[in-house]
Image (cartoon, helix red, strand yellow):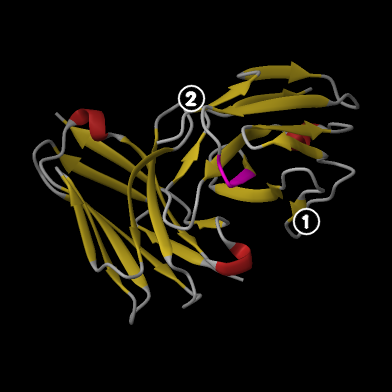
Amino acid sequence: SAVISQKPSRDICQRGTSLTIQCQVDSQVTMMFWYRQQPGQSLTLIATANQGSEATYESGFVIDKFPISRPNLTFSTLTVSNMSPEDSSIYLCSGTGDLASSQYFGPGTRLLVL
Amino acid sequence: GENVEQHPSTLSVQEGDSAVIKCTYSDSASNYFPWYKQELGKGPQLIIDIRSNVGEKKDQRIAVTLNKTAKHFSLHITETQPEDSAVYFCAAGLGGTSYGKLTFGQGTILTVHP
């Protein structure tokens, strides 16, 4: 199974600022994803992080607000830009290998925007 | 797109009893069905998953059943223990160009009373 770590684990930010979250996988994975979990809610997919190319965003999420990078098969970053209190959530990255692989999640980054 | 419904939203059992959580999905093309356990302050932990070519899978006290015709799948936990208390999420994933993308159910808060 893949072990996924995220940094920072939590942060408190002022509105209007940006935060970059890092995701590191201990082995090469084919696919990496970013999810958002609002307080007390389920997980919603933000985007697929594509290695060496632009991320693929889900409906309701845009690159200007959530720029994503994935320079190699084990690392990705998500930036939450121009933050507002509504961005207060848990941000989670996940990874999976080939078609027969399971999907694992990181511990999440807990973001509070004041 | 895919829609996943999960029931019940809360479940309270006595230690040693069994717990069953049910999910239905809408897209017959979904072929990957993982279950995650999320404890307070942690990321989702994969506890068991099943693919559409299998009807049932078991791992010690945990089992998952899948009915492709009815488009529903269930998590069964036997001999529950207080440490099983957590939020449980089901999810459904597609293959092909949407490979790896997961749609989550709303979650079930399981409480196991000693």
Residue B41 location, x and y as percent? 48, 24
Dominant secondary-structure state across the stretch colored magenta: strand
- The chain letter for the residue carrying disc 2 is B
Residue B32 location, x and y as percent? 42, 61
Residue range (magenta)? A29-33
Nearest the viewer among B112 and A106 is A106
- The chain letter for the residue carrying disc 1 is A
Q: Quarter of the image containing the C terminus of chain A?
A: top right
Q: Is residue A28 above or below residue B96?
A: above
Label 2 Cα neighbours within 10 Å, binned few <14 / some 14-19 / many ≥20:
few
Residue under circle 1? A60
Whether B46 is among the magenta residues is no
Label 1 Cα neighbours within 10 Å, binned few <14 / some 14-19 / many ≥20:
few
Identify the amino acid type marked 2. Answer: Gly
User: Which element type, helix, strand or loop, lies under badge 2?
Assistant: loop
- The reply, left or right, for residue A74 in relation to residue B23 is right
- The reply, left or right, for residue B4 in relation to residue A9 is left
Badge 1 vs badge 2, beta-carbon distance below 8 Å:
no
Residue under circle 2? B41
Circles 1 and 2 on the same chain: no
Q: How many marks?
A: 2
Query: At x 22% / y 57%, what residue is drawn?
Result: B57
Query: At x 57% / y 61%, what residue is drawn?
Result: B99
Query: At x 60% / y 19%, what residue is drawn?
Result: A9
User: Which element type, helix, strand or loop, lies under badge 1?
Assistant: loop
Residue found farthest to the bottom: B69
